[in-house]
Image (cartoon, rainbow, N blue to C red):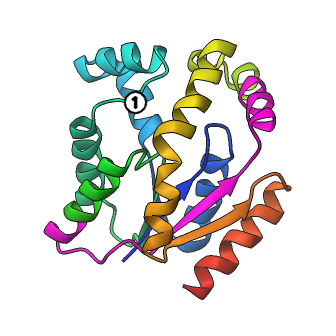
Amino acid sequence: MKYYIIFGPPGAGKGTQSFLLTERYQFRHISTGQLLRDEIAKGSEVGKIAKEVIDRGKFVEDSLVMDMIRHEICNAKEGTKGFIFDGFPRTISQAEAFDQMLKKMGCKELSGVLSLEVADSVIVERIQKRARIEGREDDSSIETILRRIKTYHTKTEPLINYYKEQGKYHPVRGERSVEEIFEGICKIIDNI
């Protein structure tokens, strides 16, 4: 079983690339953002908590996210050859907890981190376009977008060094076409 993280700022194209990777490699795509949006849409207690936190441009509690991830791994469909985690981990503490969780579950260690590198100005354009096309309320406010980008830089970017030290970090130029980005990612996966 393979375990990959697709990494990058909000709007970098992680979801698009993850979808393509699931088709090519029979991976299971686990998007913490989508899991949380599903809970919000259901109006569950988890969803209510998540909405309040997300609306402030913050991250949801680690314990809640870890429980969702564990549930998704344990309930993978037969034939799944690996996982691509999108939007997780977001902090060093989540990364450390994830490493420990994989060990406790008897899983192989993380295979690699695929990092989409995109400039902030491009991110803002992409998120605004996504909000218009998909009608995503969480993407509609420029203030929320800028807070999410700032939170990414302060809380998530430290993961770059964490994974570089482990030799698992693989940068990918994320401002190219979808096809060119996908080709670059596939070369990395095929060489791991």
The picture places residue 23, in percent across and down from the top left corner, at 60, 65
Q: Residue at x 30, y 52 (%)?
A: 72
Write down the residue under mark 1. Answer: 59
Whether residue 121 sits left or right of residue 115 in the image: it is right
Residue found at x 60% / y 64%: 21
Q: Is residue 168 above or below residue 52?
A: below
Residue 124 placed where, x, y %?
Answer: 75, 28
Residue interval drawn in magenta = 102-129
Quarter of the figure with residue 172: bottom right
Q: Nearer the viewer, residue 90 or 134?
A: 90
Report whether 176 appears left or right of 77.
Answer: right
* Position in image of residue 27 (x %, y %): 48, 66
For this view, does 16 lie left or right of residue 40?
Answer: right
Identity of the residue drawn at 56% across and 54% down: 7
Quadrant location of the C terminus?
bottom right
Image height of 129 relative to 189, above or below: above
Height in image: 134 above or below 71?
above
Q: What amino acid does circle 1 point to?
A: Phe
When the figure is inspected, residue 46 is found, relative to residue 117, above or below; the finding is: above
Residue drawn at (21%, 39%) of the image: 63
Q: Is residue 43 visible?
A: no
Instruction: Name the image quarter holding residue 186.
Output: bottom right
